Image: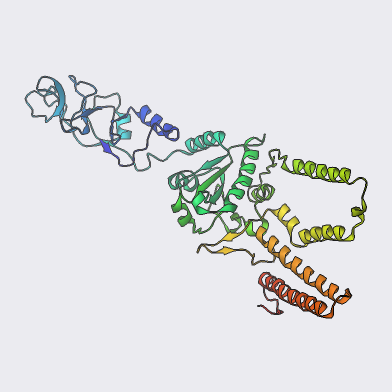
Amino acid sequence: MSALKDLPDLTQPENTMIGKRLKEMGVEICPDKLHLCPATADCCKKEDGKWDCCPKTAANAPGQIFYSSGECCHMYGFFWNCCPRSYPNASGGGAGSIKGNLTYLEVLGRGSQRVHQGTLVLPKDFWAQTLGERVQELVDLSAKRGIIRFTGDKFRQFIKATPRNYSFIIMLTALAPHRQCLVCRHAYDEYQIVANSWRYSQSSNNKLFFGMVDFDEGPDVFSALGMNSAPVFMHFPEKGKPKKSDHMDIQRIGFQAETIARWIAERTDIQIRVFRPPNYSGTIAMVILFALIAALLYMRRNNLDFLYNKTSWGLASLCIIFAMTSGQMWNHIRGPPFMHRNSRGSVGYIHTSSGGQFVVETYIIVVLNAAVVLGMILLHEAAASRGESKKRKIMAVTGLAIVSIFFSLLLSVFRMKAQGYPYSFLFK
């Protein structure tokens, strides 16, 4: 008999291989799911309601409960039990005496003999799947969804277990709403595009799989890997442990699907052609914009003087300049996170490296640039206007103050990103 506290639920699809191996061995799993009885014994329920194994005898009543140290006997005239061998009504009388314990290999080896043995001893690695079983289960799981979700136990079963003949790309994330990780959802969407592109490609094989560990489902994985932030993309090679280069630097290169695919190609030599699902929002927005412009021109068809308004064209030009000089195009290409939340829970809005930035950083730079431009316009108007002297002085002082303050803030942001830059103005 083997009593196991962590006997897996064999009704679950991921444990079918284990159930198949037990069935091939002729092992019976007792209904309490704690006791395993070899082919030479039966599961039975004792008078106290507990399950146990008892060796089979000639007069055995299959399906009843017996003690493994006794033989089948008839008690009280209405049920079978497993009694001590010295019990007067023992059907086997003692001919089936038990000597020693048999391992499951010994039970298999002596399957053709009459073995009165009720003890099943499983080796420590019995529950460990073979490499072929693991690969087949991964193939089945990835066929259902491109990204396989892992708990701590599943992570150790499929990713930490050796040997492996496959590589794994793992995303560590925190998608639960109470985690308030906005960038995690965006990164997951891009990651899913890559996983599905690989899943449906003609070159897809069982050498590369995509997985995900959510912090609320596998906090022990985060602890084991020393991770205290999300999202994180890691590559687990088929041989050896992950190196520094197996960690994707999303703060520097972003996490666009195309970027992830290029990084995977660098680590695994597997080329993934990214197929994005059709997104018609941009097309619809452009159609609406042009329709509004056309409607405006039609309504003002008798008076198109506004097309020659220098102020309107100047504002339109400034909007384009602000977007381009703030890094909006870089965001569109690289897909950086909106902001960054560190392990202490504080939020970072400015990337500390000159090679990266956050989306919110773009908006900050737009506001600072716009403020400097506004100050310069006030200075220009103060000098060029012919109004009252007092009003012109107020405009000049206000413009000078705005330029000084917001240009100093711009300089501070630059100092933060370009470490070692020696110059500053009003703010460090």
| Viewer can see residue 249 | no
Residue 248 position, x and y percent, is 61, 55
Determine whether 224 is above or below 6 in the image: below
119 versus 394 height, above or below: above
| Left or right: 341 in relation to 24 | right
- Which percent across, then down, holds residue 90? 11, 24
Residue 352 or 104: which is nearer the viewer?
Answer: 352
| Spot occupied by residue 62 in the image (x, y as percentages of width and height) | 23, 21
Q: How far from the left and from the top, in percent, is residue 126?
A: 37, 39
Residue furthest left as drawn: 88
- Give the position of the C terminus as an image quadrant: bottom right
Q: Is residue 369 left or right of residue 68?
A: right
Q: Residue at x 74, y 57 (%)?
A: 328
- The colour scheme of the drawn protein is rainbow
Q: Quadrant of the N terminus?
A: top left
Query: Which residue is rendered at x = 84% and y = 80% of the image?
Result: 389
Is 413 in front, or is 336? 413
Tell me how many marks there are.
Answer: 0
Residue 337, picture quadrant: bottom right
Is residue 415 visible in this depiction of the protein? Answer: yes
